[in-house]
Image: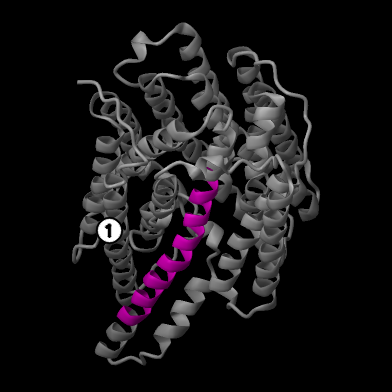
């Protein structure tokens, strides 16, 4: 993937390929989940509540296990955990594929989500613990970052093509098969575990921390859509407070708690986690695919095909970031990628009238290049600061910061986008002699038709039928997209400043 991979040992190359392969298999379900939702829920006559739960389960399952996975990798051994999680993923999606009712689908989806998150957390910690040189880590994390765009390059197109000819069960069965392929790849390619400690000690602290994080994010999601005083929101808030309070009490009482927060004592780590949280505030991919369907009138398959160049650009971003880390250092790579992402967001905010798809697509490619690339120096910086044996805890904290940032970003950005959309639509209706009060009703119907899980995903849920919108609504959508770019550009620029001036959190052994 990077310039110096050729100098890497055969053992390390095999490790990187194995981690990338198992991660790729686990990523396929996420890349195609949104395409399966509509036919699945229609086939099983799902209620609105069941559909909402199904959309939430991947996030809930992942967050519940995010801290446990870091502990499991150290206690049981990374290879064992990855194989076990791959089996759990395959089993969960097999259950989904044969499920006769929504309750069984939800159970299988929860199992699959738990398995996936375990693979993601332990894969990062495994690379960090086994790759000791800065150059090898840059190559390893660059390869791992390239997995997501590589999967998104082909999986959505294949899934939409399958769904035009076959049942949704064919796609979910593919997820199960991918899980089994992940088992095979891990068994064959990953190195044997070092002599691992016996599974001793409490597991309450990482479990409760995961519950607290999941409850916090669900409270944010419910609060933004149902109101901050809604019963469900208050229940999630109480659950979060109780969970974190229990963690705090246990951490004070236990001599050796399992939840590993030692990396937070390292200088600059909190600022790095802040940047990790700020990066997913923006999501041009989602709003772009919304625009492709509502503004340009493309179908789900056409939108997936149009997104192919953006995934190719993301692969370029992974390669560039790894190369820059090796040649110029982590600070240079991270700062430049964040500045490029900020530039892309500001470009998306520029006023435009009737504009061909090519221009926003090029801006989206620039954004994809930078947003994929920035994750590599961030991961390198955090894992470089992890103490020996603390890689699992560091990987868990990194994932938690990203999840929390994404949830907060959805709340903030949807407020910005829909407030702008309503104001623009109201002004357009008034100018054309229509009742501007309609703008609030139209905005509410559009906003209520979306979930936070949809908006935080890389692509919008495909429309069953592409409905044309009138000129007023089309311009309002464009204005909302531009507001997202303007606010997101400032947030990402702030991230670049924080990253660059984080002197204690970065150490560069740049190659001259």
Say if residue 185 shows up in the picture. yes
Q: Is residue 454 left or right of residue 296?
A: right
Above or below, 126 against 287 in this view is above
Q: Identify the image quadrant of the N terminus.
A: top left
> Which one is nearer the viewer's eye here, 110 or 39?
110
Q: Please state the horizontal and vertical placement of residue 240, each as a whole percent of the image.
A: 66, 63
Q: Please state the horizontal and vertical placement of residue 443, each as a whole percent of the image.
A: 44, 78
Q: Residue at x 66, y 59 (%)?
A: 244
> Which one is nearer the viewer's eye here, 389 or 296?
389
Q: Please state the horizontal and vertical placement of residue 245, each as a whole percent of the image.
A: 69, 61
Q: Give neighbour class at mark 1: few <14, some 14-19, many 20+ (Cα, 10 Å).
A: many
What residue range appears in magenta? 398-424
Q: Please state the horizontal and vertical placement of residue 272, each as a whole percent of the image.
A: 40, 46
> Which one is nearer the viewer's eye here, 336 or 297?
336
Above or below, 412 against 191 in this view is below
What residue is pinned by disc 1?
A: 489
Kind of element beneath mark 1: helix
């Amino acid at each position: 993937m990077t310039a110096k991979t050729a100098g890497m040992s055969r053992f390390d190359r095999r490790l990187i390929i194995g981690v990338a392969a198992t991660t790729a298999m686990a990523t396929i379900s996420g890349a195609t989940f949104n395409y399966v939702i509509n036919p699945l829920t229609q086939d099983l006559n799902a209620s609105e509540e069941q559909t909402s739960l199904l959309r939430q389960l991947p996030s809930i399952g992942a967050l519940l296990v995010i801290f446990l996975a870091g502990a499991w990798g150290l206690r049981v051994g990374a290879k064992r955990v990855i194989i076990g999680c791959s089996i759990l993923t395959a089993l969960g999606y097999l259950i989904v594929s044969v499920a006769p009712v929504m309750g069984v689908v939800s159970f299988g989806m929860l199992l699959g989500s738990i398995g996936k998150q375990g693979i993601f957390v332990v894969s990062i910690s495994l690379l960090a613990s086994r790759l000791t040189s800065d150059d090898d880590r840059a190559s390893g994390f660059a390869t791992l970052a390239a997995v997501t765009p590589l999967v998104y390059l082909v999986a959505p197109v294949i899934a939409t093509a399958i769904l035009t000819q076959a049942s949704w069960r064919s796609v979910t069965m593919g997820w199960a098969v991918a899980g089994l392929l992940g088992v095979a790849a891990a068994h064959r390619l990953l190195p044997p575990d070092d002599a691992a400690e016996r599974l001793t000690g409490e597991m309450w602290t990482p479990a409760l921390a995961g519950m607290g994080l999941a409850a916090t994010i669900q409270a944010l999601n419910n609060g933004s859509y149902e109101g901050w005083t809604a019963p469900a929101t208050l229940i999630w808030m109480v659950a979060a407070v109780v969970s974190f309070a229990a963690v705090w009490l246990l951490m004070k009482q236990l001599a050796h708690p399992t939840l590993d927060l030692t990396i937070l004592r390292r200088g600059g780590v909190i600022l790095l986690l802040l940047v990790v949280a700020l990066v997913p505030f923006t999501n041009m991919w989602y709003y772009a695919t919304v625009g492709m369907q509502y503004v340009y009138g493309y179908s789900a398959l056409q939108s997936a095909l149009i997104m192919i160049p953006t995934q190719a650009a993301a692969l370029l971003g992974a390669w560039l970031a790894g190369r820059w880390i090796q040649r110029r250092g982590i600070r240079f790579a991270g700062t430049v990628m964040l500045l490029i992402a900020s530039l892309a967001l500001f470009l998306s905010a520029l006023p435009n009238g009737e504009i061909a798809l090519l221009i926003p697509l090029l801006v989206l490619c620039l954004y994809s290049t930078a947003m994929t690339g920035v994750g590599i120096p961030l991961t390198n910086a955090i894992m470089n600061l992890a103490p020996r044996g603390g890689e699992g805890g560091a990987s868990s904290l990194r994932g938690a910061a990203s999840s929390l940032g994404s949830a907060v970003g959805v709340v903030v950005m949807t407020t910005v986008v829909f407030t702008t959309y309503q104001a623009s639509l109201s002004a357009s209706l008034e100018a054309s002699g229509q009742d501007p009060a309609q703008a609030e009703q139209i905005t509410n119907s559009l906003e209520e038709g979306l979930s936070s899980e949809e908006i935080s995903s890389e692509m919008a849920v495909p429309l069953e039928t592409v409905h044309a919108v009138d000129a007023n609504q089309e311009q309002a959508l464009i204005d909302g997209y531009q507001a997202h770019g303007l606010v997101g550009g400032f947030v990402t620029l702030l991230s670049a400043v924080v990253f660059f001036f984080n002197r204690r959190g970065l150490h560069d052994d740049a190659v001259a």
